[in-house]
Image (spheres, rainbow, N blue to C red):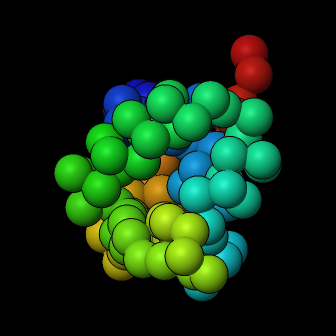
Amino acid sequence: MFKALNPLLHSQLRLSIMSLLISLESAEFTYLLEQTGATKGNLSVQLTKLKEAGYITVEKSFKNNYPLTTCKITPKGFDAFEKYVEALKGYIDKEKP
């Protein structure tokens, strides 16, 4: 029996964001933008969805008088990501007939 995949993490862009944040203490919006190749608007929408789910925190501040948005994965997000990866492994590791 296959485990259900978390639909919030099953989106390519949200999965990319979580994959980047899982190994970083935090990441700036511009870094995520460069790494994912997303548009500013789409990245912003997906970050909001992850924030609303409690998977990431988003901190807004200023650096040299410019707005700075920093994202960080939460323990809930880390747990959700690990469960997603485990469920995905179940699809990959199934014995072939």
Residue 16 position, x and y percent, is 64, 44
- Quadrant in which the C terminus is drawn: top right
Image coords of residue 48 (percent x, y): 32, 46
Query: Residue placed at 62% from the left, 29% from the top?
Result: 39
Q: Position of residue 11 (x, y in %)?
A: 50, 29
The reply to whether residue 58 is in sight is yes
Residue 69 to residue 32: above or below: below
Left/right placement of residue 37 relative to residue 68 reads: right
Q: Nearer the viewer, residue 88 or 9?
A: 9
- The spot of residue 78 in percent (x, y) is 44, 69
Q: Is residue 89 at all visible to an observer of this figure?
A: no
- The residue depicted at 67 percent of the width and 56 percent of the height is 30
Q: Residue at x 44, y 41 (%)?
A: 44
Looking at this view, is 63 or 32 the one in front?
63
Q: Quadrant of the N terminus?
A: top left
Q: Is residue 77 above or below residue 13?
A: below
Q: Which quadrant would residue 56 be assigned to in this image?
A: bottom left
Query: Quick check: 42 left or right of 20?
Result: left
Q: Residue at x 57, y 36 (%)?
A: 40
Residue furthest out toward the front? 65
In this rendering, position of residue 25 left or right of residue 44: right
Along the viewing direction, whichever of 57 and 4 lies nearer the viewer: 57
Image label count: 0
